[in-house]
Image (cartoon, rainbow, N blue to C red):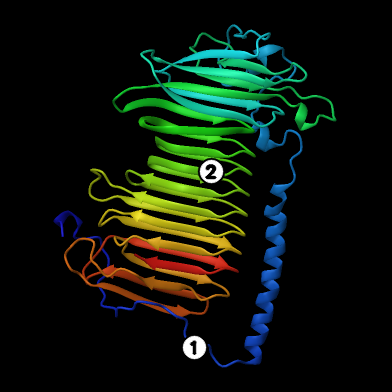
Amino acid sequence: MDQHYAHYGATCNVPHPIYYITPTPPPRRSKLRFIHAFLGALGLLWLTHHLFHRHHWHRHRHRDWDWDIHMDIEGLDHDADGCAVWDTYDSPSGHSHTLNTTSSTYTLAIPLSSERFHFASWGPIDKSTFEVVPVESDEAQVVVEVNVVKDVYNGARVCALPSRGERETYGVGIYSPRRDQPYPSEDWPAFSIKVFIPLTKHQQRLGSFETRLGQFEHTFPDLSMINFSRLSVAAANVPMVFKDVVADTISATNANGAIEGKLTGATEVSVKTANAPIEGEVTLTGSGAVRASNANSPMTLAIQLKSGDFYPRPDYHLELTNAKAPISARIASQPLNSGFFLKASTVMGDTNVYLNAAFQGDFKLSNMFNPPIVELRNKQDPSGEGRERYLRFAKRGSTTTGSVQWGRGEHAPGNVDMSNVGGSIGMYLE
C-alpha cells in the first residue's frame, strides 16, 4: 500500500467473513409483541396519510402561473411596457434596451467571454422548448435564436439582458403578461429557443450557464468538449435531457418533469424533481458531493467517482432521498483509499445500493418492517494485494449495523446510512 495512504485513524478488527445476511429467527410471540405490531401499523397508516397530503398534490394542482411556472422571479415591473419589465432584474441603471416587438423571431449575440449565459422567463407560458446546439464557427459569440411559436394576444416579449445599462448582453428574458381570468393554457404564448455555441477541437472553458425557465423542455447534446464554470438549470412540467454536460458545479431542478442523461461535475452535482423519474450517470472528478431528490417516482443512478491528482485522498459525500418510490444507485467506480459517505432514505419504496469494491467503512441499515439484505458479491481485492474481505454485523431491533474492510489493517474512512419505512433495503458489496 502507498505510504501516503497508510494511516487514517481507523481501528483494526478481525471479524468473521460472511457472505449473506439473513434475519435471525423471530422471538417467541407474546401479547406485548402483538401490541407493538398493532401500534406500528397505526403509525404506518398515519405516515402514509401524511405523505399523501405532502407529496401527492403536485400531480394535479397546476393553476395558471404557479411558482413552478414563472420560477419565482421577483422585482419585475408588470405594468411597464416592452422590455422595461426587466429593468429591475439584475441590472444597473441606464437606458432601456428593447427589441423589435413586431417580429416573431429574435436573434441575440452573447460574447463567448461572458461570465454568464442567463435565460429567464416569467408569466403564463405554454409548453415550449430550449435547445443547445453546438456549431463550428470562428465567431467568439453565442448566438441565441428565439421564435415565438404561439401568441394569441400579441403580448409575448423577448428581451436582451441586461435590459438597462451599458454592460454587454449576457442573457435573454422571456415575458408573458398576466390576463384576466379565464385564461386557458391553450391561449398562453409558446416559444422555441435555440442557443448556438461554437465548438473548438480542444477543451474550452466557458462561464456560468443558467436557466430559470418555466415550461421549457431542456435539451443538451454532447457538450463534453466544454467545461462550464457552473451549470444551474430550472424548469417545470417538462423533461430535461443531458447527453453529456461538464461543469465545475451542477444543479438541475425540475417539478413534474423527468431528468435524464450524463452529468459530470468537479465538486458538486445536485439533481431534484418530483412526480417524474431521475435516470442517468453522474460523475465527480474530485472530492465533492452528489445530491439527488425525488418524490412519487423512481430514481436510478450510476455514479462514477474519480480522483484525478487529488492528494492525499478524496472524500465523496452522497445524499439520496425519495418518497413513495424506489431508489437504485450503483457506485460504478471509486478510487482506492478514498473516503465514501452515503446517506439514503425513502418511504414506501425499495432502496438498493450497489457499493464499489473500494468501499471500506461502517454501515447502518434501519427498516421498521422488513429485514435488510446485505450481500457480499466480490472477494477479489481491487488493489491486487490479495487481501481478504471482512464483513461483520450486528442486528438490534429494526437496525442492522456493521462494517466491511479489506485485510486487517487501517483503512480510509467510510460510512453508509440507509433508512426505509414500508419498503426493502438492499446493500450489495460488489
Residue drawn at x 54%, y 90% is 27
In the visual, does 174 lie left or right of 132? right
Instruction: Name the quarter where the C terminus is drawn.
Output: bottom left
The image quadrant that residue 201 belongs to is top left
In the visual, does 304 lie left or right of 411? right
Q: Nearer the viewer, residue 200 or 289?
A: 200
* Secondary structure of the residue carrying numbered label 1: loop
Q: Nearer the viewer, residue 96 or 58?
A: 58
In the visual, does 409 lie left or right of 172? left
Image coordinates of residue 278 in percent, x first then y, are 53, 48
Q: Are marks 1 and 2 in contact (CB under 8 Å)?
A: no
Image coordinates of residue 104 in percent, x first then y, are 65, 14
Whether residue 8 is visible to the viewer of this picture, yes or no, is yes
Instruction: Tell me the residue that label 1 is attached to.
Output: 25
Residue drawn at x 55%, y 60% is 326
Within 10 Å of the Cα at label 1, are there few (<14), some (14-19), or many (20+) other Cα atoms?
few
Whether residue 87 is visible to the viewer of this picture, yes or no, is no
User: Which kind of residue does numbered mark 1 sit on?
Assistant: Pro
Instruction: Tell me the residue that label 2 is attached to.
Output: 259
User: Which kind of residue does numbered mark 2 sit on?
Assistant: Ile
Give how far apart the Cα atoms at labels 1 and 2 are: 43 Å
* Secondary structure of the residue carrying numbered label 2: strand
Q: Earlier in the sequence, mark 1 or mark 2?
A: 1
Residue drawn at x 73%, y 17% is 155
Which of the two discs, 1 and 2, sits closer to the camera? Answer: 2
